[in-house]
Image (cartoon, grey):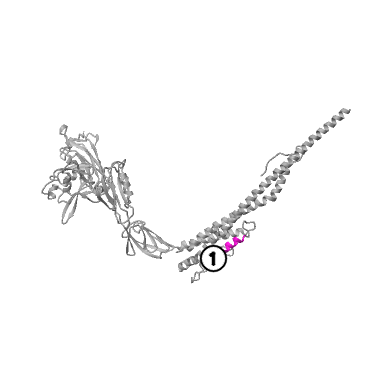
């Protein structure tokens, strides 16, 4: 540090600045430079110790890898399926594994149960449902103001062992899906407490009691002596009228479908007989103000059903026939030539073609036509739609078309579940012009209420069947974790578990490299001028590692020293490794090798030696770094103090030489004045 000041000696002719700089440099060389040099040396030493600490920590890590239980570990070979090339499972041996070959067959994967409710047009709107239901035995209460989103939140907050989500179905529409929180054969269970909420939400269907016929009047089929009066009943979101005295359950199902609901008739064995049930999607409840409504419901014996499948239904616009005041909903006998669709005349004539296009539930295309003939009726069109050769009645997944009382054609997939069913009708007139006749929209979305059935994983190991609730099985093969990926009954593969000789070899090689890195660092410091040249602490640290290499395990009959497994110091002190010698040892006596590197052998000796060198606060290297840090702090303070004294001396010299220059300047001024006076006196004498 210096302060510039021009005291160049204009009066005296002396270069005071040069004198000051020379003096300060001489003082700096004696008082500051030695301290700075010591700080630099300490910094280099600290860097060297820090580098060694990292090298020793790496050696410590590799030593710990050598001494772990099951050193070298095990590896598993898992072939793919010989018939399909699919990967059936993966296997991860632990340190407790046993070498061997195990025949494994994956019969079934574990899966989580998943339940789906029915679709609602607005998941944010209040559902006006009141009551409670249980999921897996946990009760959940619902208020009239709760939306589908609110019900989802209540289910999740109840901790009922499921996670409730809402699947978006476009716009504001959606449905609830319940997924079990864990896999296994235990399925999601639900029960109504009050309000029939499991049916209202669409998790289960509603079923009538079994009756003897689906086609005769329901009351007669049930053997009723007194017939209930015709009554309105609410089915899900629609209201229909049911007359049990005159209508069969098949007729009632058709009326429900015509109103936009979803209903079907299912048969079942009842002893040696076949009985029939009216099955609907949603809850069946009485209509307020109709005194006979509950009687009709009670007569049919509606109750909560099962989590079955819902069949998809497509519906057209309204077909009408006739004109003016006599215009009525089309019936099977309505002539095609008199049809209107949603009030617009189709103007069909003999020779015009009705083109029928769409897809069945499985996505296969349907493309056929009907040329209008004299006398063709709506029944002709229905028969063509249901044709078992080329119509929707054909194929692996047929659908059935029916004309409802409301004049709509409804096409229903005969297979429940997700469906790609679609229908469109167009006209190609005899003149060549074209027009649309009707496009069907989805009236009922096909879905599975039980999206996934919970099931356990099932495998067979060497002929023994193992059943677990997870696809990760830890106790079928001793010390081996199996992760099941694909079930393929009938295919057995051989899982081979062997000692991981390569892994063990790589671990020893990593240890050798870490040791040699420390040794190379030590050799670099033995050169005069190196930061740690002739440092006794460094030598003691390295000597402790060399001593650890000489560890003997007396209990080992063959492999009791590092040399015996191929670890040998060369004449330069570097560690060499014979892989062939080591692999022979691992093959012939793996337990002895593990013991040699284990808790009573080489691994622990190195862990102890490296810990002693690097332990925070008291390790040899740690102490050296801390000592240098503290010494450097003291030296920097001394350096700062010396710099302050040096600067103070500079200021003293500057002031001193400034005063000298001022004195010389005054003397010169006085001398000039005296000379001028003398010259004046001489002039007067003349």
Under tag 1, what secondary structure? helix
Height in image: 459 above or below 336?
below
Per the picture, the main secondary structure of the magenta-coloured stretch is helix
Q: Quadrant of residue 119?
A: top left
Name the residue furthest right.
686
The residue nearer to you, when weighing 158 against 624, is 158
In what quadrant of the picture does the N terminus appear? top right
Height in image: 451 above or below 536?
above
Name the residue furthest left.
225
The residue nearer to you, when weighing 185 against 662, is 662
Residue at figure coordinates x 86%, y 30% from the top left = 681
Near mark 1 (Cα within 10 A), the count class, few <14, some 14-19 or many ≥20, is: many
Question: In this rendering, would 664 be left or right of 270?
Answer: right
Q: Is residue 211 visible?
A: yes
Residue at figure coordinates x 65%, y 48% from the top left = 641
Question: In this rendering, would 540 be left or right of 262?
Answer: right
Residue 560 colored in magenta in the image: no
Q: Quadrant of residue 76?
A: bottom left
Q: Is residue 79 visible?
A: no
**Percent x, y of residue 577:** 52, 64
Tell me where the magenta segment starts and ends, as one range.
535-548
Q: Which residue is mark 1?
A: 549
Name the residue furthest bottom.
557
In what quadrant of the picture does the C terminus appear? top right
């Amino acid at each position: 540090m210096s302060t510039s000041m021009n005291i160049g000696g204009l009066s005296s002719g002396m270069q005071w600045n040069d004198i000051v700089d020379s003096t300060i440099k001489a003082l700096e060389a004696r008082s500051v430079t030695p301290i700075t040099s010591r700080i630099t040396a300490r910094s280099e030493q600290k860097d060297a110790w820090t580098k060694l600490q990292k090298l020793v920590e790496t050696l410590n890590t590799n030593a710990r890898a050598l001494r772990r239980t099951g050193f070298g570990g095990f590896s598993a070979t898992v072939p793919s399926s010989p018939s399909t090339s699919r990967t059936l499972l993966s296997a991860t041996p632990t340190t407790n594994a046993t070498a061997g070959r195990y025949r494994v067959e994956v019969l079934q994967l574990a899966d989580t149960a998943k339940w789906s409710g029915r679709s609602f047009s607005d998941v944010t709107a209040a559902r006006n449902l009141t009551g409670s239901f249980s999921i897996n035995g946990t009760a959940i209460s619902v208020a009239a103001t709760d939306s589908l989103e609110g019900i989802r939140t209540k289910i999740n907050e109840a901790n009922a062992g499921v996670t409730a989500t809402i699947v978006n179905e476009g716009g504001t529409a959606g449905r609830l899906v319940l997924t079990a929180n864990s896999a296994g054969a235990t399925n999601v269970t639900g029960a109504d407490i009050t309000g029939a909420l499991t049916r209202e939400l669409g998790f289960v269907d509603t079923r009538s009691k079994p009756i003897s016929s689906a086609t005769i009047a329901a009351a007669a089929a049930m053997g009723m002596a007194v017939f209930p009066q015709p009554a309105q009943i609410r089915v899900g979101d629609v209201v229909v009228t049911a007359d049990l005295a005159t209508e069969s359950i098949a007729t009632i199902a058709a009326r429900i479908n015509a109103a936009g609901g979803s209903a079907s008739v299912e048969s079942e064995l009842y002893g040696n007989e076949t009985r029939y049930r009216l099955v609907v999607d949603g809850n069946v409840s009485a209509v307020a103000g109709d005194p006979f409504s509950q009687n009709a419901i009670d007569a049919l014996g509606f109750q909560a059903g099962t989590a079955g499948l819902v069949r998809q239904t497509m519906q057209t616009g309204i077909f009408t026939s006739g004109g003016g005041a006599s215009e009525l909903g089309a019936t099977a006998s309505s002539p095609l030539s008199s049809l209107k669709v949603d009030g617009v005349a189709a103007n069909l004539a003999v020779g015009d073609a009705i083109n029928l296009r769409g897809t069945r539930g499985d996505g296969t295309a349907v493309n056929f036509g009907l040329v209008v003939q004299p006398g063709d009726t709506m029944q002709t069109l229905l028969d063509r739609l249901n044709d078992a050769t080329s119509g929707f009645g054909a194929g692996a997944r047929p659908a059935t078309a029916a004309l409802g009382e409301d004049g709509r054609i409804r096409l229903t997939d005969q297979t429940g579940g997700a469906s790609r069913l679609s229908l469109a009708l167009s006209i190609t007139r005899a003149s060549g012009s074209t027009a649309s006749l009707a496009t069907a929209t989805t009236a009922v979305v096909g879905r599975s209420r039980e999206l996934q059935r919970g099931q356990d994983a099932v495998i067979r190991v060497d002929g023994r069947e193992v059943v677990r609730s997870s696809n990760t099985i830890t106790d079928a093969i001793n010390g081996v974790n199996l992760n099941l990926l694909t079930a393929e009954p009938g295919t057995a593969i051989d899982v081979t578990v062997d000692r991981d000789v390569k892994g063990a070899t790589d671990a020893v090689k990593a240890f050798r490299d870490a040791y040699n890195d420390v040794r190379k660092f030590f050799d670099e410091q033995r050169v005069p001028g190196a930061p740690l040249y002739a440092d006794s602490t460094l030598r003691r640290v390295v000597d402790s590692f060399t001593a650890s290499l000489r560890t003997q395990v007396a209990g080992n009959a063959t492999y009791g020293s590092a040399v015996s497994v191929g670890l040998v110091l060369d004449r330069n002190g570097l560690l060499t490794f014979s892989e062939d010698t080591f692999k022979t040892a691992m093959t012939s006596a793996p337990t002895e090798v593990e013991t040699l590197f284990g808790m009573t052998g080489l691994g622990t000796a190195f862990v102890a030696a490296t810990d002693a060198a690097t332990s925070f606060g008291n390790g040899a290297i740690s102490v050296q770094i801390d000592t240098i840090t503290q010494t450097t702090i003291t030296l920097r303070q001394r350096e700062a103090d010396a710099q302050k004294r040096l600067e103070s001396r500079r200021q003293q010299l500057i002031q001193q030489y400034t005063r000298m220059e001022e004195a010389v300047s005054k003397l010169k001024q006085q001398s000039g004045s005296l000379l001028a006076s003398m010259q004046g006196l001489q002039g007067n004498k003349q």
